Image: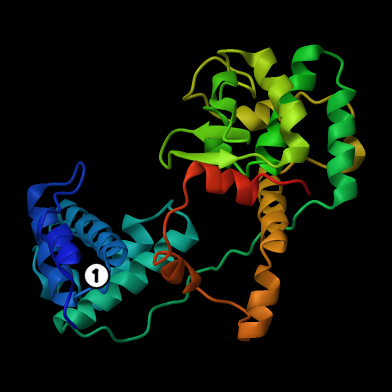
């Protein structure tokens, strides 16, 4: 399959951030032979192939396709070189490396040992959400009330993940584009619209925090920020421990329902698909006003 000129240029210009030039050269060579269909696919393949080559250098392996793309080396890299990474990333890495190996003519058998597949966390019910906000309002100090309410709003209203929560200050929450947005920094910088029902408590928490962090603390690199906040809650023992992952799952389910994804999947006869992300890559990137109009509405 012929690659378009943008994909070809992306592969040819790849250097890899923090990667040895030899590892980047290996990645360019094998990914070009695999002929990915789009730029996003090429970037994914370049990333994993360069990391494979960098890991191979640390264990004394020759940086040639027949050595590094051999199924036993790929399996060892996934199990050892990517140890500590999430299961989804490791599964994707192995699939991509086997794809590149096949494109280069390297045998990919036998089939690999299955990796554990994590499941989505259960969303909170509306009653549970109300109970958490009632607990926030009942905290004994003003600071604790605002911090817990801010955490709930950032999770339920903007879907922020644990690592992203620690970097959000009051200044990152802004009334803009006809709604309220959170300017997320870090590994995946972006603008996230906040659901309208969480505007007021989140703006109040942001005003209280000012230039400080909404969820508390003094450093953007501090660890266990949400755990420390949750551990200090007064009351609410009947609710169990607050799970930030479930807050994000609740936000996702809210939008999937509003956007009609269940109806689309039912009509298409799809029960589970990893191709939706590939299809979404072909859609135009929405601007901030479109994001707010689409995702910032009321429940």
The x and y percentages for residue 200 are 76, 28
Q: Is residue 200 left or right of residue 88?
A: right
Instruction: Pinpoint residue 147: horizontal percent, then vertical percent.
Output: 71, 23
Q: Secondary structure at mark 1?
A: helix
Q: Residue at x 89, y 36 (%)?
A: 237
Is residue 85 visible to the viewer in this orientation of the structure? yes
Q: Eyeballing the image, is 20 above or below 104? A: above
Q: Position of residue 168 (x, y in %)?
A: 55, 27
Nearer-the-camera pick, 157 or 299: 299
Type of colouring: rainbow
**In the foreground, 26 or 231:** 26
**Please, is residue 224 above or below residue 15 in the view?**
above
Find residue 44 and report its image quarter. bottom left
Q: Is residue 149 visible?
A: no
Q: Looking at the image, is 28 positioned above or below residue 98?
A: above
Residue drawn at (80%, 13%), measured in percent from left and top?
Answer: 142
What residue is rendered at 41% in x and 62% in y?
90
The residue that mark 1 highlights is: 73
Count of numbered marks:
1
Snapshot quadrant of residue 108? bottom left
Q: Crowding near pointer 1: few (<14 within 10 Å), some, many (20+)?
A: some
**Residue 267 position by quadrant:** bottom right
Q: Which one is in front, 89 or 287?
A: 287
Left/right placement of residue 6 relative to residue 153 reads left
Residue at point 59%, 26% (across, down): 174
Q: Position of residue 87 (x, y in %)?
A: 48, 61
Quadrant containing the N terminus in the rendered view: bottom left
């Amino acid at each position: 399959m012929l690659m378009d000129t943008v994909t070809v240029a992306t592969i040819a210009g790849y250097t890899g951030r923090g990667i040895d030039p030899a590892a980047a050269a290996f990645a360019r060579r094998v990914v070009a032979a695999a002929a990915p269909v789009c730029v996003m696919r090429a970037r994914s393949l370049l990333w994993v192939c360069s990391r494979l080559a960098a890991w191979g250098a640390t264990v004394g392996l020759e940086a040639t396709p027949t050595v590094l793309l051999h199924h036993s080396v790929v399996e060892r890299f996934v199990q050892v070189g990517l140890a500590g990474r999430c299961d989804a990333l490791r599964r994707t890495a192995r699939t991509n490396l086997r794809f590149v190996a096949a494109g280069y003519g390297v045998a990919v058998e036998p089939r690999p040992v299955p990796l554990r597949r994590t499941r989505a966390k259960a969303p909170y019910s509306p009653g549970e959400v109300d109970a958490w906000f009632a607990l926030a309002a009942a905290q004994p100090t003003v600071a604790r009330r605002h911090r817990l309410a801010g955490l709930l709003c950032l999770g339920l209203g903007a879907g922020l993940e644990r690592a992203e929560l620690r970097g959000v200050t009051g200044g990152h929450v802004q009334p803009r584009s006809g709604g309220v947005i959170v300017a997320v920094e870090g590994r995946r910088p972006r603008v996230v619209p906040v659901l309208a029902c969480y505007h007021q408590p989140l703006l109040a928490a942001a005003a209280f925090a000012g230039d400080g962090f909404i969820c508390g603390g003094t450093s953007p690199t501090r660890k266990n920020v949400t755990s420390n906040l949750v551990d200090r809650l007064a009351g609410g023992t009947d609710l169990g421990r607050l799970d930030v992952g479930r807050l994000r799952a609740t936000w996702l389910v809210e939008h999937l329902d509003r956007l009609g994804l269940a109806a689309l999947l039912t009509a298409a006869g799809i029960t589970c698909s990893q191709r939706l992300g590939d299809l979404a890559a072909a859609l135009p990137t929405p601007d901030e006003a479109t994001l707010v109009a689409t995702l910032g509405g009321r429940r």
